[in-house]
Structure formats: structure tokens, C-alpha cells
Image (cartoon, rainbow, N blue to C red):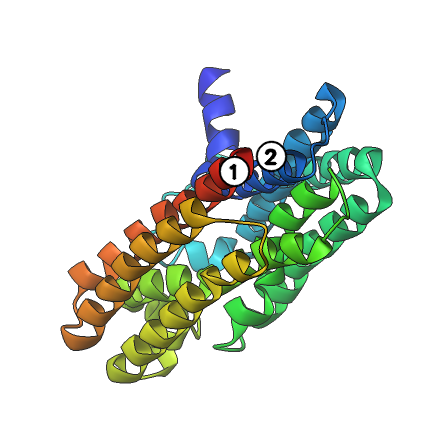
Amino acid sequence: MGNRFKNYFELTKPKIWYLLVFTSFGSAITASLLFHISVQPLTWLFLLGGVAAGSAAADTLTGYNDRDIDAIMDRTKGRPIPSGRISARHALIFGLILAAVSLLFAWSINILAFVLMALGLFDNIIVYSKWLKRTSQLNIILGGFSGGAPALIGYVAVTTQHIELGLVMAALVFLWIPTHIWSLSLHVKKDYTKAGVPMLPVVSSEERSVRVIAGTTLMMVLFSILPFFLKQFGLIYVITAIVFGAAMVGLSIWLLLRPSERASWTVFKFSSPYLTALFIAFMVDAFYH
């Protein structure tokens, strides 16, 4: 039973959904502190449980869609489905159950949370994984809505006041995705090439790929300053955004000037702490607002 639980847990790709649940939590805490709204324990249960289930469902069902290419790539061939630890049929059933739970929990919050959850699942499972991943280098851009959805769900679970703040927090995650994914894709370019997945580094030269990564990183960092000008956040947030943003830009310049697997891997690994730091800054700044 322990091994079975471990296999199904691994199937959900927890390293991915941990961060998405945190952005949802961060945006909800930020909204509650800014507007002095008390969030009921049941709402927290539906929010965090729903986003965790929805993110896990998306990762499980994209894993089901990608089982053939996962079996080809060295990085993914040990995952539960291609390795044979979980059958494709059982993975599909498990993913659909998780999706149903996420939608039920989102419905229990409010109709807007339900719509966002449904759109996020559709975008990730159908638009990105089923349609664009194998056909277009723009796959992660057009499929990026699902990454920002948890942050917006967290915000609307608390309030719709100044909804532009929730949209900015979600957009920050959306803009973070290209740097995060393309730097990883550059690091494992051989795998994606072998599987025939048209990620940017596969269909473009290394020179163009690192330029695009540097450009998207700069765009993300500049955008991260925007909340300060919305006059809802102060020095704690903007200093954090500038310091961590400078580090992100510095790493992307390193990758631009000296492309290497080490540089691309470092950009990829630092991108998650960067986003985490921004959402912590949102919460801390809102606390002292």
C-alpha cells in the first residue's frame, strides 16, 4: 500500500503543484489582509484542497496524454506510467476523479472560482498537452493560462474588490512560465528533440533561444514592479521584486553570454524561489499595509 500511494503521489508531479497551491494561498492571504476580510476555515479547505486536486489532476492527465513521449525521453521514462508502475487506464481514472473533486470544491467557493478552475483544467489538459505541445513552439504561451489560474482563484475566493490586483498576480505567474519552462527545455534539449516535441530550443537555434529567454525574463521582472504603482503595495514588496528580479536578469544574461547546460539549469532552478519570494513579499507587505 505504501508503494502504491507513493506511485500515485508521484504521478501527480507534486514538485509542480506545490508551487501552484502556494500562489493560491499567497494571493488569498494577500487579499484578506489588504481588505481586512476573514476567511472561514471551510473556504480554506475548499480553496487549498481544490487547487491541489486541480493541479494534481492536470499533471496526472497530461502525464496520461504524454505517456508515449515520456517513454522516449531519459528524463521522464522512469515516471509511473511509462515505467509500468501504474497502468494508463488507472491513471486516467485517477486523474478524472481528481478533476471532479477540484471542480466540486471550486463550486463550493463561488461560481467564479469554478469557472476559473474549469478553464485552467481545459487549458492545461486539452489546449497545451493534447493540442499544442506536439504542434507549436508557442505551446507554453498559449497554454500558460492554467499556470496563473490558481493565483486568481485564491484571490476571488476572498474578494472581487480591486480585481486588477488578482489579475496582476496571475499574470506574473503567466509571464514566469516561459523563463521557467524554456530554460529547462534548453537544458534537456536532446530529450525533447528525440521525442519530437517542438519546444523553442528544439526548433530554434541556441543563440535565438537564449535571446528569447533573456527577453521574457526581463519582461517578467519589469512587470513584477507594477503592483507597487497600483498603490496597494509598498517598499517591502518592491525591494524584494527588485533584488530577486536583478538576480533573475543577471542569470539570464549569464545564459545569454555563455550558453551552457549549467547556466540553463541554474536559471530554471532559481526561477521557482524567485516566484516564491514575490508571493511571500505580497503577503508580508499586505500585513504591514
The residue nearer to you, when weighing 53 against 74, is: 53
Identify the residue at horizontal 28%, vertical 61% (top origin). 246
Element at label 2? helix
Q: Is residue 177 visible?
A: yes
Residue 134 numbered mark, or none: none
Q: Please name the residue that numbered disc 1 is placed on.
A: 283
User: Disc 1 vs disc 2: Cβ atoms closer than 8 Å?
Assistant: yes
The residue nearer to you, when weighing 231 against 254, is: 231
Identify the residue at horizontal 72%, vertical 53% (top origin). 162
Element at label 1? helix
Q: Would residue 288 appear left or right of 24 to someone viewing this image?
A: left
Q: Taking 35 as reference, is 117 above or below it?
A: below
Q: Please name the residue that numbered disc 2 is placed on.
A: 29
**Label 1 CA crowd tier, 10 Å (few <14, some 14–19, many 20+):** many
Percent across and percent down for residue 113 are: 77, 45
Label 1, label 2: how far apart the Cα atoms are: 6 Å
Identify the residue at horizontal 16%, vertical 76% (top origin). 257
Percent across and percent down for residue 144 are: 57, 63
Q: In the rendered image, which quarter is residue 192 located in?
A: bottom left
**Label 2 CA crowd tier, 10 Å (few <14, some 14–19, many 20+):** many
Disc 2 marks a residue whose amino acid type is: Ile
First in sequence: mark 1 vs mark 2: 2
Disc 1 marks a residue whose amino acid type is: Met
Q: Residue furthest left?
A: 258
Q: Residue furthest top?
A: 1
Count of marks overlaid on the render: 2
Q: In which quadrant is the C terminus drawn?
A: top right
The residue nearer to you, when weighing 250 against 55, is: 250
The residue nearer to you, when weighing 96 against 249, is: 249
Q: Is residue 16 visible?
A: no
